Amino acid sequence: MTILGLDVGERRIGVAVAETDGFGARPLLTLRRGATPAIDATALATIVDEHGATEIVVGLPLDASGVDGTQAGLTRRWLEAVAAVMAALEISIVWTWQDERLTSHLAEGRLGPMRRGRSGGPPSKTQRDAYRARVDREAAAIILEDALTARRAASPATETRA
């Protein structure tokens, strides 16, 4: 079974993929947000179809205190609109929330600092955009890994005897 992870931002959506029988998630791609949730839903529907995904884990940007803030509310409303469009397209998918606090910070730590520009100067806009897209994909992978880890921890251990 394939699961997708999403890091939904204002401009981009980081996407990661994992198999439930595996132990890791890998960054897949970064989508530029469409003008409407319907455009995003169509792009996600293509990815769901290509990978045979049955579930999507969406990062929920909670405030540091653990409660919904402005961004969490925007993400919830985005998901409601996207889920409605995907249901209208007859795409059956399970949607799950995962706390995404600090995932972008962790992703930046995994990737290291942004490279300098030509001749050691500041990075160009193209370099900054490419780095941010990589961070979004990596953050989506962290969100998905966290969800899979939480599931493994919650499921009872199976014991085998010889």
Image: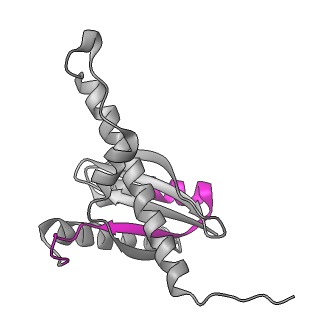
Q: What segment is highlighted magenta in the picture?
A: 41-66
Residue 15: give x, y in percent of width and height: 44, 53
Is 107 or 127 nearer to us in this picture? 107
Residue 147: give x, y in percent of width and height: 45, 72
Which residue is most to the left?
70
Which residue is most to the right?
162
In the image, is 102 to the left or to the right of 25? left
Is 49 magenta? The answer is: yes
Residue 21: give x, y in percent of width and height: 66, 69
Q: Quadrant of the N terminus?
A: bottom right
Is 56 or 120 nearer to us in this picture? 120
Is 89 or 56 nearer to us in this picture? 56
Identity of the residue drawn at 30% across and 40% down = 132
Is 48 magenta? The answer is: yes
Res 85 visible? no
Res 65 visible? yes
Which residue is most to the front?
162
Question: How is colour applied across the structure in the image?
Answer: one colour
Residue 101 occupies quadrant:
bottom left
Identity of the residue drawn at 39% across and 41% down = 111
Tell how many labels: 0
Residue 84: give x, y in percent of width and height: 37, 73
In the image, is 24 to the left or to the right of 81? right
Q: Quadrant of the C terminus?
A: bottom right
